Amino acid sequence: MSDGRLSINQETVKQWSLPELAEGCAKAGIDKVGLWRAPVQEYGVERTARLLSDHGLSVTSLCRGGFLTALDPAERARALDDNRAAIEEAAGVATDTLVLVSGGLPEGSKDLYGARERIADALAELAPYAAERGVRLAIEPLHPMFASDRCVVSTLSQALDLAERFPAEQVGVVVDTYHLWWDDRAPAQIARAGATGRVHSFQLADWITPLPAGVLLGRGQLGDGSVDFRALRTAVEATGFDGPIEVEIFNEALWARDGAEVVAEVAARYAEHAC
Amino acid sequence: MSDGRLSINQETVKQWSLPELAEGCAKAGIDKVGLWRAPVQEYGVERTARLLSDHGLSVTSLCRGGFLTALDPAERARALDDNRAAIEEAAGVATDTLVLVSGGLPEGSKDLYGARERIADALAELAPYAAERGVRLAIEPLHPMFASDRCVVSTLSQALDLAERFPAEQVGVVVDTYHLWWDDRAPAQIARAGATGRVHSFQLADWITPLPAGVLLGRGQLGDGSVDFRALRTAVEATGFDGPIEVEIFNEALWARDGAEVVAEVAARYAEHAC
């Protein structure tokens, strides 16, 4: 069934505490997890690292740095400080990949181009800092429906335009099926990312409708929606990518269920639709 | 204030009947409207044409044909019949432009490419039929958040890939700021559309968040959101486009207000943000 590549992002089973996640994944025969900063900070960075290591789990990514589009200098300085802290947390939990959600438009601004340039400026400060700590920055293009309020980087093409200004071992991209499935240019842009070794993370979630209010928690269990996972995985692996494949689903219906049941379902759906 | 280009799409003031629309626009000094099929069918096609003509109003577009992605032959035949009826209704209300919302993925399908090819096949049948009646088909790319359930044509680039298989006087595109504002390729694709005379309709609505459940009714009044109207209008007019500019906002808060007040506000916002 399993190909040993599956990683469970902790937001998929948000109902679980970190100890429950560690124990639950280990029991389910899963040896990789993706983490989020808030629960890691709450549990403690070192304590998290020890807990996961004790359960034989490795960490495929930490979410998230980013929000680098502020115009206000003080706000911008705070964002950079916060990203340096995120880089240290990533190193602390022994992952090589910090996912960046780049940030939306500042209040009142309509300048998407300017916002993307400010991201590039911030990456110039953060990428060497991360590299010194063994951490790569992975720019995640978010679905265009998040362009104004979360992430002005909406396509893999835009993410690569930013990433390629830096060495590949410092800045790459996240290929997340939920954000990219609709884009006819995605296969070509995945090839472009792979050609320079910039696929730093590969994440799966399905696209389902109707979208809920606010749209953030509308992701679907694998197989419930419109995403052709096998086609996208084929495109990613054609580049030589053989890293972890992380399932990250934000969905309140999954959070209301038993975590072990959700993880078992994710593993089964992964085998059915993505292998 | 006004530049004589503004057209009010009737969905912007859905609270108005057709006679109220005709009278209200005439009173507000607006001489162009965009129409939708359901209210026109209900009022009667000929009767609508007479009503608008009596008030000195011309019709800039009829919404909407499309939904051309069905796999089932009977469903497909029904869609083609319905589109021929829409073309006749467009001719009947004396507009030269029928807007097409192309359709989403059929139940269970994940094949976006195949769906787009079926749209091309349908256009080959419908475009000459429309041309004989003096009607152009205008493919509207819808925001990628509608790709699965409403329209597999998500970018101006994809719309032009379809339209360019046909003569420009038969098949063109709709440039709608709501759907395209986030796309860094939009200006270049607007130029591409203009170069072959394929900007058949130019529509305005603003992008606001949070999106409501179902996302369809989340459009914003001009100036309330993130869209840089002046930049997009400049790109459209750089192609030589000097046609009507239609404001089409689906928003329950606008529908709850007095129609005359909404139209006055639209005209003022248009002058402030889009002229």
Image: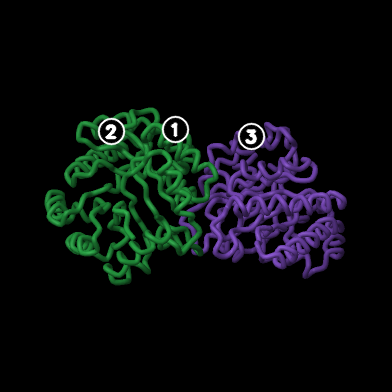
Chain colours: A purple, B green
Q: Position of residue B41 (x, y in %)?
A: 19, 52
Give amino acid for label 3.
Thr
Q: Where does residue B42 sit, x and y in percent of width and height? A: 18, 55
Q: Position of residue A237 (x, y in %)?
A: 69, 35
Res A4 → quadrant: top right
Is residue B267 at least partly visible in the picture? yes
Residue at mark 1 to residue at mark 3: CA–CA distance: 25 Å
Residue A32 visible in the shown view: no
Q: Earlier in the sequence, mark 1 or mark 2?
A: 2
* Badge number at residue A159: none
Report the side of B268 relative to A167 (left or right): left
The C terminus of chain A, quarter of image? top right
Q: Chain of mark 2?
A: B
Front residue of this view, candidates B39 and A13: B39
Which part of the image, by quadrant, shows the N terminus of chain A?
top right
- Are dots 1 and 2 in contact, CB under 8 Å? no
Query: Which residue does the image show at 23% across and 60% down from the upper left?
Result: B29
User: What residue would you read off at disc 3?
Assistant: A234
Left of A235 or right of it: where is B252? left
Q: Residue B126 shows which numbered tag?
A: 2
For the residues beneath circles 1 and 2, the answer to whether they share a chain is yes
Judging by the rendered image, the residue that carries numbered circle 1 is: B161
**Above or below, comparing residue B65 to residue B253 in the picture:** above
Which circle, 1 or 3, is nearer the viewer? 1
